[in-house]
Image (cartoon, rainbow, N blue to C red):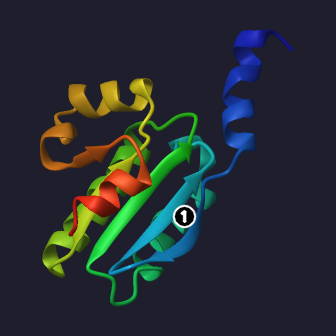
């Protein structure tokens, strides 16, 4: 298999997932894997679980430390989480977003509606 044709399989091999961590008045959702359309059902499940994990938290922090790639489907999942947060009076903060993903968000103009921080600690400090 050539390196070019193997590339998408490597991304899909790291299926999207969400891990929850409580933190003060907020919650940290650590994202992992490639949030791409090729992930199929795993992306849908991961995106749905984003807001199910929130509970009564006033702030939702999405940690992108373990996310190698996001495509338009992944951006859609993030925008849906943002809309859900806004509609329920919560704040959505994004942490450790890689330059490649940040560029995609800038090009799609999604960057304008989201809040970005380099670390979870800085995001948490901004809520006080």
Task: Tell me the quadrant of the picture where the N terminus can be found.
Answer: top right
Residue 67 lies left or right of residue 87; in this view the side is: right
The secondary element bearing badge 1 is classed as helix
* Res 7 quadrant in image: top right
**Against 54, is 78 above or below?**
above
* Res 84 quadrant in image: bottom left
Q: Residue at x 33, y 90 (%)?
A: 56
Q: Position of residue 71 (x, y in %)?
A: 44, 36
Residue 107 lies left or right of residue 78; in this view the side is: left
Relative depth, front residue between 70 and 121: 121
| Residue 80 visible, this angle | no
**Against 105, is 50 above or below?**
below
Residue 18 lies left or right of residue 74; in this view the side is: right
**Against 88, is 21 above or below?**
above
Disc 1: CA contacts within 10 A as few (<14), some (14-19) or many (>=20): many
Q: Residue at x 39, y 88 (%)?
A: 55
Q: Residue at x 67, y 35 (%)?
A: 11
Q: Position of residue 62 (x, y in %)?
A: 42, 57
Relative depth, front residue between 8 and 50: 50
| Residue 97 visible, this angle | yes
Residue 30 lies left or right of residue 13; in this view the side is: left
* Res 68 quadrant in image: top right
Q: Which residue is mark 1?
A: 46
Task: Tell me the quadrant of the picture where the C terminus can be found.
Answer: bottom left
Q: Residue at x 26, y 80 (%)?
A: 58
Q: Position of residue 118 (x, y in %)?
A: 37, 40
Q: Position of residue 50 (x, y in %)?
A: 45, 69
Relative depth, front residue between 113 and 1: 113
* Residue sticking out furthest to the bottom: 56
Relative depth, front residue between 10 and 86: 86
């Amino acid at each position: 298999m050539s390196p070019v044709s193997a590339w998408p399989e490597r991304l899909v091999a790291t299926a999207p997932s969400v891990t929850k961590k409580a933190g003060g008045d907020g919650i940290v959702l650590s994202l992992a894997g490639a949030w791409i359309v090729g992930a199929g059902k795993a992306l849908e499940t991961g995106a749905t679980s984003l807001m199910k994990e929130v509970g009564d938290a006033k702030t939702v922090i999405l940690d992108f430390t373990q996310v190698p790639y996001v495509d338009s489907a992944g951006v859609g999942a993030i925008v849906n989480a943002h809309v859900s947060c806004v509609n329920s009076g919560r704040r959505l903060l994004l942490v450790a977003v890689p330059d490649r993903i940040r560029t995609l968000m800038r090009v799609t103009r999604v960057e304008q509606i989201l809040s970005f921080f380099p670390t979870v600690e800085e995001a948490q400090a901004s809520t006080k």
